[in-house]
Amino acid sequence: MPIKKLMLRLSLPAVAGMFFTALSSLTDTVFVAALAGNESERAVVTGAVGAAFPLHALIQAIGFTLGTGAGSIVSRALGEKDRNLAEQTASSAFWFAIAVGGGIAALGMLWKKPLLVFLGASNEVLSYASAYLDFLLPAAPWIVAALTVSHLLRAEGKTLYAMLGMVAGAVCSFGLTPLFLFSLRLGVQGASLSLLLANGIALLIQLLFYYRGKTVVSLSLKNISKKIKTYGKMILMGLPSFLRQGLICASTLALNRVAVSFDTEVLAAATMASRLFTVPFSVGLGIGQGYQPIVGYNYTAKQGSRIREAFLLSLICCTVIFSLSGVVMIGLSSLLFTRIFSASGEILSLAQAFFCRQGIVFPFIAANMLCNMTFQSAGKKWTATFLASCRQGVFFFPLLWILPHFFGLSGLVWVQAAADILTFFTTLPFLAIGFRRLFQVSIKPNPESFCR
């Protein structure tokens, strides 16, 4: 199949799924903010959701780790016609995801208050954040499993099935969140209860395709590996995803702590800006998720020219989308925050400051994201791990200390943007040198496959 047609087939469902999921997360924050009667209360409830976000990001990080790690092995195993390995890896990843998610839920409920204090929740937001965790923590097994299964479906080219589960969950969230918050008056708890049910529905729909035999591999208990090496391998392969998502957790936690040291309104503004930013970013992430199975399969099939074509197409699409999004972010920031969050006063000014700085550098993010995904899908885990750690780790943490220390709040709003610029220039040598070797794998006749 021609690369352009294949990219369209694999990326469009992934884009739709990621976009609706990001939109669901955004609307949860919007509805929670709407509970507030005044500006100071809006800052507190929005800050509470922001304080709980690092934990949500960590739960997602584990799902992405198991999903992308197992998915990379599955797609390459299918490229080598090793269905047994693909079956064993997929089954082990799914049941391991359920177990790990359950462990997180149990431990989190036991130490909920100390956990929130560690996450940077101030006394003002502690009670709201605790209420939000009442259902977020029990949702952990379903969140981890749903993300894992979604990546496993994409690994064998079933991106449409992955999308249907994610979109169904998001649509349920759109309907349930206002019902729980305003009709049933469950408050902040209603938003996390909606999250739990939405992820449960998404997982059930995805599993339905396995149950009906619509997939290449199955998720059977009898195929679970008893070897620690199997799980270690998928975790190592998913390590770049864990760093990418785990560092979102760590960087958000650190940013929350610094923001709260200025004011609760700064925390609320940073939360609003980050939630709105995830919507256009999810589109590029969806393109990348459609691109990854092509790399994994064609790398083992020695089709370097097809990897090159897919990469260039993905890079152009993501850069154009991020550039246009950046223009909108800068030009319409006031309107977006006023209409979506009903923000005003200092919160509006601060949210605009965070958002516009991110919009300026948005086009530069595409190169690092796709470069990292390419090396990960080709099994180059350590290169991918380093690239994944740059944007919200290697550069973010030093800048989070340096810029606010010397420039105060003005420095804080530039931290992520400055980290993105440094990450872009770090990525360029890998694009120039590493990809030349990756694209020059020996050529074989195109195999019969979904990635042909």
Image (tube, rainbow, N blue to C red):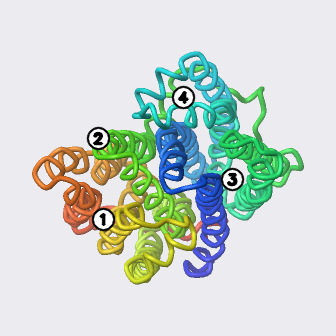
The residue located at (46%, 36%) in the rendering is 124
- What is the number of the mark on residue 329? none
How far apart in space, not on screen, are marks 1 and 2 (Cα)?
43 Å
Could you say whether the residue bearing mark 1 is in a helix, strand or loop? helix
Q: In this view, does 276 lie to the left or right of 141?
A: left
The residue located at (58%, 52%) in the rendering is 75
Chain-order first, disc 3 or disc 4: 3
Q: Name the residue under label 4.
A: 231
Q: Name the residue under label 2.
A: 261
Q: Which of marks 1 and 2 is in front?
A: 2
Q: Is residue 59 visible?
A: yes
Disc 1 packing (10 Å; few <14; some 14–19; many ≥20)? some
The quadrant of the image that shows the C terminus is: bottom right
Asked whether 51 or 19 is in front, the reply is 51
The quadrant of the image that shows the N terminus is: bottom right
Look at label 4 and name its amino acid. Answer: Tyr
Quadrant housing residue 192: top right
Circle 1/circle 2 CB separation < 8 Å: no
Disc 2 packing (10 Å; few <14; some 14–19; many ≥20)? few
Could you say whether the residue bearing mark 4 is in a helix, strand or loop? helix
Provide residue 403's location: percent of width, then percent of height. Answer: 16, 53
Q: Is residue 72 above or below residue 333?
A: above
Look at label 1 and name its amino acid. Answer: Phe
Could you say whether the residue bearing mark 2 is in a helix, strand or loop? helix
Provide residue 318's location: percent of width, then percent of height. Answer: 44, 75
Q: Name the residue under label 3.
A: 153
Asked whether 74 or 23 is in front, the reply is 23
Q: Mark 1 points at which residue?
A: 435
Chain-order first, disc 1 or disc 4: 4
Q: Is residue 317 above or below residue 70?
A: below
